[in-house]
Amino acid sequence: MIYDEIALWGLTDQDTVEEIWEKSFHYLKMQGGRVSIATIKNGRPESRIISLQRMSDHSVYFMTSRGKPFYRQLTQHPYIAASSLLDDTHHCIRISAQVEECTDPAVYQEYAQKNPGTMTMYRNNTDIIVLFKLLKGNGEILHLYRDDMVRRLRFAFGGTEPEPLTYSITDACTGCGLCYENCAEHSIYRSQDGKYHIRSMDCDDCGICYTKCPLAGTALVSRLTDQ
């Protein structure tokens, strides 16, 4: 099997963010939509395993109970971070999203029909069940493939933009090539004008290029330190 062909299921940086999100969720759905979701509790992260489901309105939802600490955390800080392994070829997904409580009875009814086990579990008071919708957010799919190299693509949904790379090369680049020589992922390439650029889908976001650039902070900038 050629790992370049299975990395990211054939997706490339020529695909749209919508296509990347759709294919990522397709593979997530194939394993039941199970993800580890983190919220904030008293200023610290707390996580649990939850199943994400798409309803006929094409939005993605998850369920909890109004009696759970999870519900209170979501109402106090309506943001989640989720991650999961997607298959046996070292793909994983990460999602950061703003969520909102669903009040649409049609969505609730559809969920009840698709999840009879949940309704049985809460049969003594199904009114305690609450759905949350992934309102908007972004994320990435990542594949650790040939020779432990990384390939990644970023996506967004709900009208947001994908998160940019941590490191980028500016027009101040003098073309010395030190970033290129030290990039373990071979994600840096030289254009016809002699300047270097980073191909985002091959970048590990590790920062080695930044540590080697003699003009770090001007020719090669970091969102972590140079804002």
Image: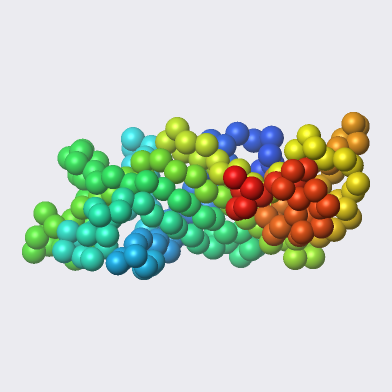
- Side of 205 where 4 appears, left or right: right
User: In the image shown, does 98 or 141 lie closer to the viewer?
Assistant: 98
Q: Position of residue 147 (x, y in %)?
A: 79, 65
Q: Residue at x 23, y 66 (%)?
A: 69
In the depicted structure, whether residue 16 falls above or below residue 39: above
- Judge whether 132 appears above or below 170 on screen: below
Q: Quadrant of residue 227?
A: top right
**37 relative to 164 in the view: left or right:** left
x 28%, y 49%: residue = 132
Using the rendered image of the protein, determine whether residue 148 is visible from the camera's viewpoint: yes
Q: Is residue 50 visible?
A: no
What colouring method underlies this structural image? Answer: rainbow
Between 185 and 65, the one nearer to me in the picture: 185
x and y percentages locating residue 19 in the rendered image: 57, 37
Q: Position of residue 75 (x, y in %)?
A: 24, 53
Find residue 205 and report its image quarter: bottom right
Q: Residue at x 88, y 53 (%)?
A: 178
